[in-house]
Amino acid sequence: MEQKIKPMSIKEIREILDRAEIGELAAAMEPFYNDERSGVVKLLEAGEKKLLRHRQELERLYQMRHYERTYASYQAICGVDEAGRGPLAGPVVAGAVILPPDCDILYLNDSKQLSEKRREELYDEIMEKAIAANVGVVGPGRIDEINILQADYEAMRIAVGGLKVAPDILLNDAVTIPGLAMPQISIIKGDAKSVSIAAASVLAKVTRDRLMQQYDEMYPEYGFASNKGYGSAAHIEAIRKYGPCPIHRRTFIGNFL
């Protein structure tokens, strides 16, 4: 009498699907479509939703490479963005990133749309995959000296000038940077429309947030770890109570003293 083969348990199937990389998931699911157990059906439905989300994410990234495709005749396309124009304390930081053509970094987006955890993960992936990446940092003293707009430009020039590969064209988030010779394309809300600018946005934001964490250890009374130097009610109250610390922008806080 032929012995009937016992089917895999739902737990075993779940483990197989959980271990499968996204590119292998459809093939991993294929053997189980004839299994009518409700638990298996739910696992396959969850897998199909995961595949759909992945396809949608790839499509979103394809749309975000519109400008990179438009200017594909340039070999080294560099995205540029900044973080920290508005805070009352700390530096302004600019990022400059050259990505390989058709580089897929899943969930890359305007840094303001991302969680801190996601930004940290993307930072590591950007640094791993980028052809070249650099940041420029301009401190509060210089901001007070030349004003925030000029400090912003200076940080961007530092970021671009320090790249190990010279860019052929810049994709910038809503600015044209004075003093740079290469062509520049200013894109309104570019950090949500270009993967290169989004990558620069993440680099600038993560770098600045890490600096503000360090400043929080030096000046804990101002809550820099949580407010990142922005004008929260608690931060403004701390300025009034303790006065400014060395990283406050004096031209930004006159109304609170």
Image: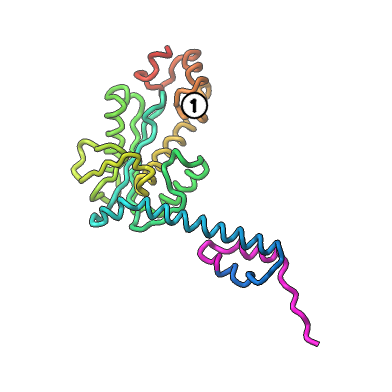
Furthest residue to the left? 181
Q: In the rendered image, which quarter is residue 152 located in? A: top left
- The percent position of residue 215, horizontal first and vertical second, equals 47, 29
Is residue 241 part of the magenta span, yes or no? Answer: no
Neighbour class for label 1 at 10 Å: few (<14), some, many (≥20)?
few
- x, y percent for residue 162: 29, 44
Quick one: which residue is furthest to the right in this view? 1
Q: Residue at x 61, y 60 (%)?
A: 45
Q: Amino acid at mark 1?
A: Met
Q: Is residue 204 left or right of residue 158?
A: right
Secondary element under disc 1, as helix, strand or loop, is helix
Q: Which residue is mark 1?
A: 218
Quarter of the picture holding the N terminus: bottom right
* Residue 44 screen position, x and y as percent: 62, 63
Q: Residue at x 47, y 55 (%)?
A: 56
Q: Residue at x 21, y 40 (%)?
A: 180
Q: Is residue 54 above or below residue 176?
A: below
Residue 201 on image: x %, y %: 39, 41
Give 201 or 216, whichever is nearer the viewer: 201
Closer to the camera, 63 or 201? 63
Is residue 2 located in the magenta-colored stretch of the structure?
A: yes
What colouring does the structure picture have?
rainbow
In the image, 147: left or right of 248? left
239 over 224 or under it: above or below: above
Q: What range of the chain is rendered magenta?
A: 1-26
Quarter of the picture holding the C terminus:
top left
